[in-house]
Image (cartoon, rainbow, N blue to C red):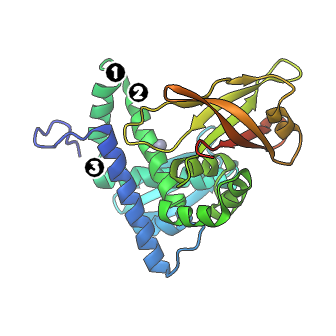
Amino acid sequence: MNHSNDVNVRRLSVDESVRLVIERARQLAEQLIEHRGHSNPPFLPEEYAPLQSVKAIMKSDLGQSSGVLLRYPDGYVIKVNANQHIVRQNFSCAHEIGHVLLDDLNLVPQVEEVAYRTFNPQANGEARAKARERLCDIAATELLMPSFVFKEYLSSFGASVHAVERLAHVFRVSITSAAMRIAEISSEPCLALLWQPLRGPKPPCLRLSWCVGPSTNAGIVRNAPVHTQVRMPSSLHRAYDENASVKSFRQFRLGNTIKRLPTESKGFGSGENRYVISLAFPSR
Ligand SMILES: [Zn+2]
């Protein structure tokens, strides 16, 4: 089905597409809760599959791919990469269900058209695919961590780096997904940051990989730490080296102002994959 040439199809903005996808994912979560009679996490992709005509989820060696969606006349089959960590598999599978959801909403032709016009009129197929993949990630996030349930758990745990670990465990998602989700929906404003060691220099320099803040409608306000590369010695390195959480103050650029924010950091993972997650609190 290709509606992109249909002049009667109203074109949606990126924000509208995002809103529709979240709304649809939320409906599915509510449907699931009603179906099984409780709202206790985890919300596993296997539970959503039958609600979205997914006949089977297969685990196999997919090489470099995380997941694949196969479309058959009588339904869908999802393949996920059995070699990846289980929380990664959960996310990949939920992402593929996101593709089904986009099919349902018939959003793809419009999303691609919007991405084409909004981001870069010269955009190639890859740039259009990016907009689509981002929507599937948004759907996956809402399916695995429905905002209304996640919010409840977050407020009972309280926003802290320890809560990141507990929420990741309860919702069976990665530490980084849980940290981003906290920043997105915490009722107390909160920024989540990921720091990774720069390969090469010893002792390693820790570099900011991303900083996520509360989702704003316009998405224009830029919040980021002033220093995005941190040398030894630092509280971040202490968090990297030890297993305890470390409290400190860090300078952030919040829109047009610079403010020192209380920050909590903790190291996760091991060896090559060791990283630090920080949460910073603009209103504390
Ligand atoms: Zn995809």
Does any portion of residue 53 appear in the rendered image? Answer: no
Q: State the image coordinates of residue 114 (x, y, percent, origin top left).
A: 28, 33
Residue appearing at x 45%, y 40% in the figure? 134
Residue appearing at x 81%, y 22% in the figure? 231
Residue at disc 3, secondary structure: loop
Residue at disc 1, secondary structure: loop
Q: Amino acid at mark 1?
A: Asn
Q: State the image coordinates of residue 101 (x, y, percent, origin top left).
A: 37, 55
Q: Quadrant of residue 228?
A: top right
Q: Amino acid at mark 3?
A: Asn
- Dot 3 corresponds to which residue? 106
Q: Quadrant of residue 281?
A: top right
- Dot 2 corresponds to which residue? 127
- Dot 1 corresponds to which residue? 120
Alpha carbons under labels 1 and 2: distance apart: 8 Å
**Viewer-nearest residue: 97 or 64:** 97
Check whether the beta carbons of the residues at disc 1 and disc 2 lie within 8 A of each other.
yes
Q: State the image coordinates of residue 188 (x, y, percent, origin top left).
A: 56, 52
Residue 240, above or below 102:
above
Of the numbered discs 1 and 2, the one sitting upstream in the chain is: 1
Of the numbered discs 3 and 2, the one sitting upstream in the chain is: 3
Residue appearing at x 69%, y 41% in the figure? 262
Residue 219, above or below 256:
below
| Position of residue 166 in the picture relative to residue 137 (left or right) | right
| Position of residue 256 in the picture relative to residue 116 (left or right) | right
Q: Amino acid at mark 2?
A: Ala
Q: Nearer the viewer, mark 1 or mark 2?
A: 1
Q: Nearer the viewer, mark 1 or mark 3?
A: 1
Alpha carbons under labels 3 and 2: distance apart: 19 Å
- Asked if the beta carbon under badge 2 is closer than 8 A to the nearest atom of ligand 1, the reply is no
